[in-house]
Image: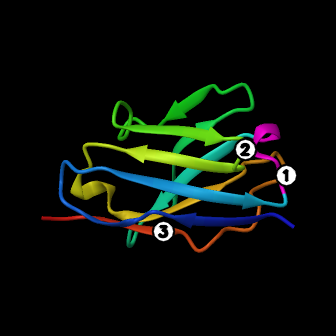
Amino acid sequence: QVQLVESGGGLVQPGGSLRLSCAVSGAIIRDNTMGWYRQAPGRQREEVATITTGTRTTYSDSVKGRFRIFRDYAKNTLYLQMNSLKPEDTAVYYCNIPRPSGFVSWGQGTQVTVSA
């Protein structure tokens, strides 16, 4: 069974940076497209960034140029480097594996709050 454990969130001022981590067990990240998603209060969960097995990356327009998704195969861990954070980036962030059959079970997520 796949388990996803997100960490690295916190409170940061506008313009600051955070690096989120997603430790994956039960699946090999090298063999899967991986993604970061976020859900702000009162809003639907949205896709933030994805990385394919071929390392092609995609980003939502709202984070393009500020966020970077990458992986550490040795640690089987997915990362999201977030720079130039804005208050509108405040949300709970999740990682997942977007398979054709659907997402795997969601982890608990990690809270990111951008506020002065």
Quadrant in which the C terminus appears? bottom left
Left of 13 or right of it: where is 57?
A: right
> Which residue type carries mark 3?
Thr
Whole-number angstrom distance, CA of label 1 to CA of label 2: 27 Å
> Do the residues bearing badges 3 and 1 touch, measured as CB atoms within 8 Å?
no
Q: Residue at x 19, y 48 (%)?
A: 15
Q: Looking at the picture, which amino acid does disc 1 mark?
A: Ser
Dot label at residue 101: 1
Q: Nearer the viewer, residue 112 or 100?
A: 112
Residue at the image point whose x is 43% and y is 44% from the top: 81
Which residue is denoted by mark 3 in the rendering?
A: 110
Q: Earlier in the sequence, mark 3 or mark 2?
A: 2
The residue sitting at 69% across, 50% down in the picture is: 75
- State the residue position of label 2: 74
Could you say where residue 57 lies in the image, as x and y percent from the top left?
A: 57, 29
Numbered badge on residue 25: none
Q: What residue range appears in magenta?
A: 27-32
Q: How is the image coloured?
A: rainbow
Q: Is residue 80 above or below residue 43?
A: above
x%, y% of residue 42? 39, 72
Closer to the camera, 68 or 97? 68
Q: Is residue 44 visible?
A: no
Q: Is residue 43 visible?
A: yes
Q: Secondary structure at mark 3?
A: strand
Give residue 100's quadrant in the image: top right
76 left or right, relative to 81 = right
* Real-space Cα separation, disc 3 to disc 1, in angstroms: 25 Å
